Amino acid sequence: MTGTTMIGVIGGSGLYEIDGLENASWQRVETPWGDPSDEILTGTLGGVPMAFLPRHGRGHVWSPSTVPYRANIDALKRLGVTDIFSVSACGSFRENMAPGDFVIVDQFIDRTIAREKSFFGPGCVAHVSVAHPTCERLGAHAAAAAREAGANVHEGGTYLAMEGPQFSTLAESKLYRDVWGCDVIGMTNMPEAKLAREAEICYASVAMVTDYDSWHPDHGEVDISEIIATLGANVAHARDLVAALPGRLGGERDLCNHGCDRALDHAIMTAPGARDPARVAMLDAVAGRVLG
Ligand SMILES: CSC[C@H]1O[C@H](OP(=O)(O)O)[C@H](O)[C@@H]1O
Ligand SMILES: Nc1ncnc2[nH]cnc12
């Protein structure tokens, strides 16, 4: 065993709080990247420490483009989170991935264009691999927990991350489905997953299908009221999934067999003497393990 587990849950549309945490309190966490989306609910569940952050803030105040992704991941790292389960609503490009189903995403195509995507930059340059952008081990736990929660689960799927906030045109929807082979679409998992990798936190993405996007001949345009109704009907599965996580992960953890927790081992390019102390100071939580 190399350390203790702390589970982080990022709640997406429809999931703004969770129940059942012992010693629960909402905590304000300051980061060098600004304020996170909201205070973070911390406590323990089944004896395992947990932190819950509503991605859009309570009351849904942040749009997909304005979610403070860097502050969110930094704040979770700062609290000691080792394993993030991201919960999101998504549209589906596959007939068999029906509204209400859960997809354990394992690949992304990042089409977002207006977001800060890295903690690194001038003064401290780093390049991590995101060839396999989610943690296989955590994804398997997410799939098992979702099944335990009674959801219909698809293990594996490619998520197209779009900028939004508008939904896709019909031509875009067909391109993503027929040409690019994507399975689901959403607006938030990028750059979240990339930042989690830079912060050496294992990351799994649980996408709850709310609609068929616009490609489906029998479903027409994406209708937000239908999305909200589907979310309402499925949020109980998401809460049950979260409740099943501590029992699956346990309180102690080994090194990640996927290497997520060592992603920065050989990633930093800037020579020690050439690093900008101000940038290095901002990386205290995210990259303190390798920057010292
Ligand atoms: C409510 S429909 C569009 C909205 O829902 C998804 O949010 P999240 O990923 O946080 O669950 C999608 O990405 C859009 O932001
Ligand atoms: N069809 C869709 N496109 C983008 N984001 C979504 N979130 C839920 N449904 C979506």
Image: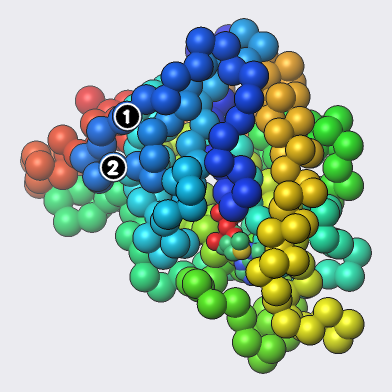
Query: Number of callouts in the render?
Result: 2
Q: Position of residue 204 (x, y in %)?
A: 63, 42
Amino acid type for the residue under numbered disc 1: Arg
Mark 1: is the Cβ under 8 angstroms from ligand 1? no
Residue located at (72% from left, 53% from top): 231
Would you place residue 83 above or below residue 123 in this image?
Answer: above
Residue located at (23% from left, 25% from top): 292
Q: Position of residue 78 (x, y in %)?
A: 34, 27
> Which residue has dot 1 on it?
28
Mark 2: is the Cβ under 8 angstroms from ligand 1? no
Residue 260 visible, this angle: no
Q: Secondary structure at mark 1?
A: loop
Q: Position of residue 3 (x, y in %)?
A: 51, 12
Q: Is residue 228 left or right of residue 70?
A: right
Q: Position of residue 282 (x, y in %)?
A: 20, 39
Residue 34 visible, this angle: yes
Residue located at (62% from left, 49% from top): 14
Comparing 49 with 193, the one in front is 49
Dividing the picture into quarters, in which one does residue 20 lie?
Answer: top right
Would you place residue 245 above or below residue 202 in this image?
Answer: above
- The answer to whether the residue labelled 2 contacts the one labelled 1, judged by CB atoms less than 8 Å apart, is yes
Q: Is residue 291 left or right of residue 109?
A: left
Would you place residue 160 above or below residue 218 in this image?
Answer: above
Amino acid type for the residue under numbered disc 2: Asp
Q: Is residue 175 left or right of residue 276?
A: right
Comparing 46 with 54, the one in front is 54
Image quadrant, ligand 1: bottom right
Residue 194 tag number:
none
Q: Earlier in the sequence, mark 2 or mark 1?
A: 1
> Which residue has dot 2 on it?
35
Q: Quadrant of the N terminus?
A: top right
